[in-house]
Image (cartoon, coloured by chain):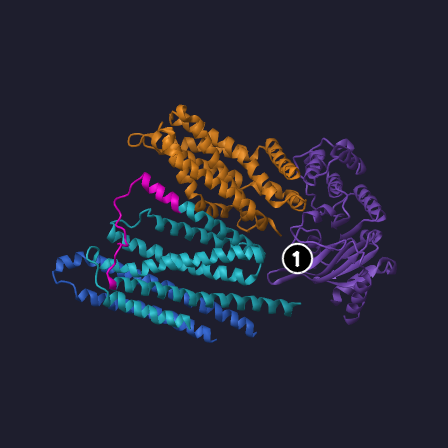
Amino acid sequence: MSTVQAETARAVDSGHRESAVLEARGLVREYGPVVAVDGIDLSLDAGEFLTIFGPNGAGKSSLLGMLGGAMRPSRGTVRIRGAELSYSDVGWRNRVGILSHRGFLYARLTAEENLRFYGRLFGLSDLDERVSARLDRVGLSDRAGFQVRHLSHGMRQRLALARALLHDPDVVLLDEPYTGLDPSAAQVLRTVLEELRDGERTVVMVTHDLRQGLQLATRVAIQVAGRFAWERSAEAIDTNGFESVYHRVVERT
Amino acid sequence: MSLYLRQIGAIVRKDLLLELRSRERMTSMAAFAVLAGVLFSFSIDTATVRPQDVAAGLVWMTLVFGGLLGVGRTFHLEAQDGAFQGVLTSPAPKDAVFLAKTFANFVMLYLVSLLVLAVFALFFGLDVGQNLRWVVFVLGLGSLGFVALGTLFAAVATGTSMGETLLPVLVFPLLVPMVVYGVGSTDRLIAGRPLAEVEGNIRMLGAFALAAVAAGAALFRFVVED
Amino acid sequence: MRAIKILSTLGVVLLALSALSAVGLAQEMENLPQASDLARQSLRPYWHVFAAYTIAIVLIGGWAVSIARRLRAVEERLLD
Amino acid sequence: MLTLLGLAGLIFLFYLSFFWVSTEIRQGIAQRIFYVHVPAAWTAFLAFGISALCSGVYLWLRDDRLDRAAMAAAEGGLVFATIMLTTGPLWGKIAWGTYWTWEPRLTLTLLLWFIYLGYFMVRSSTEDPEKGKRFAAVVAIVGALDIPFIHLSVIWFRSLHPEPVVVKPEGPSLPGDMLTTLFTGLAVFTVLFLGLFLFRYALEGLRAEADLRARRSAA
């Protein structure tokens, strides 16, 4: 227990840089008597890809919610490029893209209409080209005129991905993006995420899928009971032995 | 500013388009209006009461109950697939979201209220002819006030475990003044009284609608915050 | 703990007071003119006054007692 | 302390209103309801006022203490409004010959009662307490904003449908002993409310502390 905490503390210290794109300090989120997130610090540079694993109820979604401005922290601060963000900050929402296992899509709008709608909310000017380029990128050009309810789950998820990245966010937050994806959709997602990482974006992903989670990560954390119980840079991780590491950390904490 | 208006426009367009495609809410509200007209017709003993005398009150009650039916579902459609979360995490200000949702609801309810008026004119033999424009205007103000409060509290009710069943408890006490002013002016306009007699009522109705919209726009962000 | 005692006392005394108001009522009734039929007819106001005061007392006392009970529950939780 | 003062005051009020004050001639004994009815109404309005004010500032500052005060006041307001609403008809039946009239203040209190019923329903039916606090505050604020409209509209409503002549309860000049009793009543009810309100507020504070400890021991 104590060694794990010490390691975590060191990892956090070494992660603290002034140039950090996304930085969180002492984030806490309480729901009445329940503490979902219990003091998390993190600091991520451009091009970093943090994967967070953890059992159900560890507060992973709450953490993402706070980073993405969907949820007001009970305590603590979030900064993007050094600028402290408040919950009512509109500019924040321009810099963050959120993709959850739910698509945030309207079933009775077509794929194109969904993207256009969100594009208008984000105040994007070059909507026509942008929408068609994104649809093309996720392989849905031929389905642009289909209502979302007529699309398969995999297609919806790809469309949701296009929606989340429509405004070219600096920071991309992913909550269980692989849930229920067919192999080809998972492949599209993986390629897009890889491009994001290599294109100097900052990505935070929450997932249960150990294999998919490790594939792209530059850093890995295991969240248990609202805290990072374990954190490493990806190079230091033995991919094959990770599963036993995970179980050990979760059980010990 | 123009971005603000564009954002409002986007949400309004999206809401109306969705309604046009699903027709869920309009259908239920319209069916309710017609059926209420039928039931009310049978609930009045024409030997003792002249239907025209009570019609104004019934029009407003139909509007309130029918409106609750549609407005209460405002955020249900949004909640499917978490779409409303997408709207809330977009840079659109919360008051813009509220104004847009209110406006879209207003368009729907206003259409229904005109239908209600037509239905009651038909079933109760109302002669609205001479003050028609003003009756239509009064119904518009009423719909606006109702929709503003309804949208705000629909968001509250959707966030609770009781859901829509909570909505009437929250909204009805607040709607009393609207009903008083609305019925007061509609009643007299239908009876062919001069406009001057109801000017005060209409002004109060307008003030009520304005206050409701302003309060909703100011408070909505506290309701949808997570 | 003191708070609970105060509140409980208050509640109990208030409830006892409702009995007192009955005494007050009786007192007033003795002052009535003894024209028996008339008196019976005008008994209703007395009854209403009595009911009103009782309601006031019972509600306030009930509130006090309920606060006291909840206070006790919370203090037990805190002592655990 | 305040509460004990209130208690002593209440006994004194009883003494005054039962044994001391002279009976109003026109309305007879029933007029004595006045001395609980009016103070209860005043206290209810005071309580709801405090509640709405604290709710508004709560949304602004997000200090839990304000929310606790708002809730404690709302609960008291509900209690005193109930007194007002039940004693009113008891008096009205004798003074006006009918249990209920749409008298403006009676109507306003009734609607406020329902608004604050909604306030507590909203609170108790949210899983996330923070959300419940915000929702309740919104209800309280909109309710407070609605008061002038309700009040004006009820007056309006009555002018359209005149009721049988209502005996205005407060004559412009009350005899001295009645005035004294009334003011005693006002003071007593206010003090009682404030005393109980403070207890209620302290209760919420303790509850929050108990929650906090539970949270700590769980972590």
- Give the amino acid type for the residue marked by disc 1 in the picture: Pro
Q: Extreme bottom residue here?
A: C2
Q: Quadrant of the N terminus of chain A?
A: bottom right
Report the span colored magenta: D151-176
Chain letter matching colour cyan: D
Residue D201 position in % (x across, y down) = 49, 65
Residue A180 position in % (x across, y down) = 74, 46
Chain B: drawing colour: orange
Q: Which residue is mark 1?
A: A73
Q: Is residue A148 left or right of residue D157?
A: right
Residue B55 is at least partly visible in this image:
no
- Mark 1 — on which chain does it sit? A
Chain A: drawing colour: purple
Q: Is residue D172 magenta?
A: yes
Residue appearing at x 35%, y 66% in the figure: D188
Q: Is residue A248 left or right of residue B52?
A: right
Residue appearing at x 38%, y 25% in the figure: B125
What element does badge 1 sit on?
loop
In this rendered view, identify the residue nearer to me: A132 or A236.
Answer: A132
Above or below, comparing residue D107 to residue A236 in the picture: above
Residue A220 position in % (x across, y down) = 81, 58
Q: Extreme left residue here?
A: C35
Chain letter matching colour blue: C
